[in-house]
Amino acid sequence: MLVLVIAVLPWLGQAHVGSPDVFHDGEVGPYPVRITIRMPTVVPGRAEISVRVQGTQPEKVFFSPLFARTSITNAPPPDLGVLIEGETNLYSGELWLMSVGAYTIEIKLSGLLGTGKVQIPVSSVPLSQLPMPRFLGIILVGLGVILFFGGVAIVAAAARESVLAPGGVIGKIERRKGRLAAGITTVILLLGLLGGRRWWNADEAKFRTQLRGGAWPDLKAAVRVEGTQRILRLTLGEVAFGSAYSVPLIPDHGKLLHLFLIREGTQDGFAHLHPVRKGGNIFDVALPALPPGRYKVLCDLTMEGSVLSSTATNSVEVPTLATQATLAEVMKPDPDDSWAVYAGIPVPKNSGVAAVYRLLDGSQVEWKATAPIRVRQDAGLNFEVRNPSGQPVDLSPYMGMLSHAAILRSDGGVFSHLHPTGNYSMAAQAFFDKKLERETRTVDGAVAPMVDHSKMDHSGGHAKHKSGVSSISLPYEFPTAGDYRIWVQFKVGDQVQTAVFDTTVAD
């Protein structure tokens, strides 16, 4: 007991790369909603959920946690959301997430307009290990000492006196039996403590492998020049999984990896690329016409077995392309790869009035945000795209979404990849869609009506794929204060464009 107590020492995680909170903007059945899920930093822990309904109000809101490795028939009963006092359309609740792994939070709304359900995937991982208060440690150590010596004393007394007749006197034989029993008990308890210490250390080591207090898994990055191309090679999870291990990944928008390159320092070079597996845990991608320099590498992925989503990071030196000889391409770029170079182009900053970024062709992207932007409040990422004459443009889908966006804090400690529906993994959402469909089928193969869950609109919700749409709305709340840069990507015709904005987030 004493060794177990001493083993419970504080050990804190490092800064988390990414935004642990999850956001969704879309329709749940007939109800347009904006959902925020604040993830716990420890496991088990409680996720805080808020649902703001933008329209006709439902009568009831329910929350349920569905675990990836458990049948939905074994899921706990749903919790009822509570209408926040003083609000007319904001509901909140809490759910316990008991295990490390992938969950989907099912949110159900019912009212006069009918019923709607939506599942939002989240990754339940510990970001830190809570320290034990010193006073509590002292109390537990004291109780452990009392239990240890108390147990020895009880066994010794029982060996000495349990067979004595009432009123009998303890003799040498009884005292010898007591000392022998006390010695044996001491050895047994010490062996138990040593075994418990080994178990605790093993459990502690396992827990620390699950901590995601930083980028994960490990990522190596190197650039080689072949002909007229620079090829970036990524080695994923060599330390975490072993050099010969083929990391199992789920495709997201048809891509195993979404890679972002951001030039360090000036941040005037940006690329959104999609590496191709070359075997095992090795991926290659042809670099576009980015200026030379050192680049931050941020790689979004979703693991197949655990369905956990993460961001692996590193940095890499991109060399100058020395030769311009006409040679065959070593590697064909992915048709959805995109990049932007904006050295010398002023980057607008949100300062209380609309910020406008001007593209090289004269088009304009207006950020309609108002300052100040504060931590854990709606960031107001609403953008309007206009052509050179100032008229709204007709946006086209880009990899199944109306827009993709990347957010990076100036020190690199926070990164997020956003879509109009939210910042969760579409690969994880597709996994849970299939799981729910498979586990809710009736005997004749039809989907049970009682589990008529609404699928998320991957196009961005609110009919974002219809013609004539020129505005982009991205649900997000900044997790920490600081200076941030935002890259907003969209497609006009066959051309992917990237607009860039700066902002400062206050506490």
Image: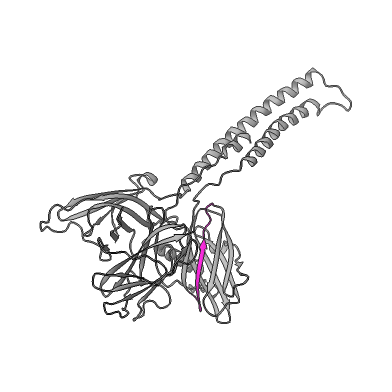
In the rendered image, is residue 385 in sight?
A: yes
Q: Main secondary structure of the magenta part?
A: strand
Q: Position of residue 126 (x, y in %)?
A: 50, 51
Asked whether residue 36 is drawn in magenta, I would say: yes
137 left or right of 172?
Answer: left
Q: Position of residue 493 (x, y in %)?
A: 26, 75
Q: Residue furthest right?
A: 167
- The structure residue drawn at horizontal position 44% and vertical position 60%, both measured from the top left corner, is 505
- The structure residue drawn at horizontal position 77% and vertical position 28%, both measured from the top left corner, is 157
Image quadrant occupied by the N terminus = top right
In the rendered image, is residue 435 in sight?
A: no
Q: Which residues are magenta?
A: 27-42
Q: Position of residue 212 (x, y in %)?
A: 45, 50
Residue 244 sits above or below residue 21 on the image = above
Residue 166 sits above or below residue 481 on the image = above
Q: Position of residue 469 (x, y in %)?
A: 36, 79
Query: How is the model colour-coded?
Result: one colour
- Between 29 and 135, the one lying in front of the other is 135
